[in-house]
Image (cartoon, helix red, strand yellow):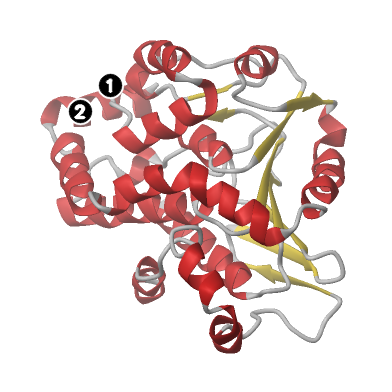
Amino acid sequence: MKMALRACLRTKPGLTGLLSQLSCSGHAAARRAPALVAQRSSSSTSQKIKVDFDQSSGVAVMHMQSPPVNSLSLEFLTDVCIALEKLEMDKSCRGLVVTSSQPKVFSAGLDILDMYGKSPEHCAEFWKAVQEMWLKFYGSNMITIAAVNGSSPAGGCLLSMTCDYRIMADNPRYSIGLNETKLGIVAPFWFKDTMVNTVGHRATEMALQLGLLYSPAEALKIGLVDQLVHEDQVLTTATETMTKWLAIPDHARQLTKSMMRKPTIDKLAANREADVNNFVNFITKDSIQKSLGMYLEM
């Protein structure tokens, strides 16, 4: 599993290398063998996620299925990175819908058990996996739609923000936001940058300092999500919305997406090692470990 993750970490995010890929598309196509072939539809399943890929539509659905709350553990992140890499390599896959198989939750965010009472080496490996998940989703050449069918705090909110479009269940019991400060944790700069790119500077400043979790209606108002639908229509609506995005020529959409996101991607790519060191130094502090321990006891 660790070897697979390290191989995954060496791969550049899709949008970062898009211009060079388009300039030599013939060579790239020859090198990229489809990961899922010879079937009209297929599925790939790990313990943590299930991917259903319909080759006739070119759309895959990634179901997060890590009970109880789809926590983003090292193992989960590794599985996600590997699955996303396979889809990116398959030139017939144009779109990806991300959703949850767990009731009432999209993802509860980063797994505290991978940060509490762990060695600096483990914390570093975990944070590299978090970085890689973000880079692969935020820089994906595919159309990505988050079908947020439950609560999505912290890292779950980050995952949804990496997608091109977010559809959330209109249930006032659900919430979404980056609430790290309430756990005594500071959201790193690329969490902040992602949110600024989504909802603007002032809304982000308020949200991050106060650790705000928004109801679906509040999230729609500030632009954290793009659409609210009835709970049992989230996945159907995501599929219907994908059709509209697929109507846009890939090269034009991909270049536009790259133009918008590449500066943010490059910023992390140029500072990954420093970001890992900052995280490890912060998360292993006695005061932070004490805060995490108190949260776990609650």
Looking at the picture, which amino acid does disc 2 mark? Ile
Looking at the picture, how far across and down is residue 91, in whole percent? 67, 74
Looking at the picture, how far across and down is residue 255, in whole percent? 57, 54
Callout 2 crowding tier (Cα within 10 Å): few <14, some 14–19, many ≥20: some
Q: Is residue 38 visible?
A: yes
Quarter placement of the C terminus? top left
The residue depicted at 44 percent of the width and 59 percent of the height is: 16
The residue depicted at 36 percent of the width and 38 percent of the height is: 112
Q: CB under 8 Å between callouts 2 and 1? A: yes
Q: Is residue 72 visible?
A: no
Figure quadrant of residue 251? bottom right
Query: Which residue is tagged 2?
Result: 288
Query: Which residue is tagged 1?
Result: 184
The number of discs equals 2
Looking at the picture, which amino acid does disc 1 mark? Gly
Q: Nearer the viewer, residue 200 or 230?
A: 200
Vertical relation: 57 (above or below) 202: below
Q: Nearer the viewer, residue 11 or 73?
A: 11
* Label 1: which secondary element: loop
Quarter placement of the N terminus? bottom left
Vertical relation: 289 (above or below) 129: above
Looking at the picture, how far across and down is residue 114, in whole percent? 33, 47
Q: Report, in whole angstroms, how far the alpha carbon at label 2 lies from the one at label 1.
A: 7 Å
The residue depicted at 38 percent of the width and 44 percent of the height is: 263
Is 146 placed left or right of 240 in the picture?
A: left
Q: Indicate which disc, 2 or 1, sits on the residue closer to the N terminus.
A: 1
